[in-house]
Image: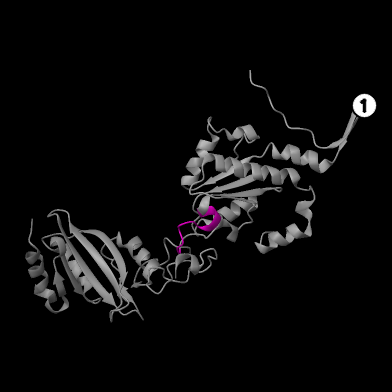
Amino acid sequence: MSSVNIVKAPAGVEGSGFFATKFDEVVGLARSHSLWPLPFATSCCGIEFMATLGSHYDLARFGSERNSFSPRQADLLMVMGTIAKKMAPVLRQVYIQMAEPRWVMAVGACASSGGIFDTYSVLQGIDEIIPVDVYVPGCPPRPEGIIDGFNRIQDLVRSESTRRRNSEEYQNLMSLYNIQ
Amino acid sequence: MIENQVVLDLLNKKFTDEIKNVTEPYGLLTFETTKDSIIPMLNDLYTSEYKFQYLTDICGIHYPENELQLGVIYHVHSLQFNKRIRIKVFLDEKSPEIPTATTLFKAANWMERETYDFFGINFTGHPNLSRILNVDDMVAFPMRKEHPLEDPNRIDKKDEFFGR
């Protein structure tokens, strides 16, 4: 039987019958290992994502067993594929419907920059309409790449202050995109 | 199979002066006409004994070097005689207007909307001439040659990396 790895407790003070640590770190630890992704897959990157979810690569190992197809119950928006300009308001609406805290991952060249589709009908990167936390390069990226991007999201989640979403800096970021 | 000349003879009875530049690339009868005679001509083809009653396609084209820059191209098909012909109409780019073919073919509705969407050709009398494929708030007509090929908002494609 293989050994089971569990995450280490955050740094803290331990004594007889108690363990004290920072609330931020406990919340970050818990959140980072139960991210519910919302797959917004429009093309070939979505096919790679299907492989990422499958038994061989198994994204569920990282705590995202449940893929959410409702934005209300999702933590992470994974945009995989070309976003046409006509699709942009739909993607924006999905992002707005997600509850805070929310993260966004742009998977592949098209979602990150428009990719090879430098033309009148294609959005030149989803960061023109919504803020993006992690970009995964590749056309399409391999499942390992998507998993690595997911791990970088986990790092962000783990280290995020619980007050970040109320900060003025974050409000300014949202107002840049005319959200809220 | 009916010959191209048979169709031409039929049309020449009424439209002798309106038929120009007759060619037969790959055996497909192709000619130009004017915006005033296109609908009567399609009508006559529709009701003729050869029954050109299937509208395969309507599309646009832009030749910036020509005097009449914008074109509308009609492909009609006779299902009974398995005969296809192609009719071109060229329009002035400053006021590209042409009567709608929806009076004759229901199928022309979306084809004309698409041609309007990409080339800005106004089909007068169309029941709902609005954009069909592009975003509603687009102001340009992207298939016209003056429309830039690449998105000007893109900042990562620097000319020096592409040798230009």
Q: Quadrant of residue B146?
A: bottom left
For badge 1, the amino acid type reads Ser
Q: Residue at x 14, y 69 (%)?
A: B23
Q: Is residue A75 visible?
A: no
The residue marked by circle 1 belongs to what chain?
A
Q: Quadrant of residue B47?
A: bottom left
- Magenta part of the chain: A110-120
Name the chief secondary structure element in magenta: loop
Q: Is residue B123 above or below residue A77?
A: below
Q: Residue at x 10, y 73 (%)?
A: B12
Callout 1: helix, strand or loop?
loop
Residue A16 placement (x, y as % from top left): 92, 26
Along the line of sight, the residue nearer the viewer: A178 or A127 = A127
Q: In the current view of this chain or complex, which residue is farthest to the right?
A: A16
Q: Residue at x 65, y 45 (%)?
A: A152
Residue A138 placement (x, y as % from top left): 51, 49
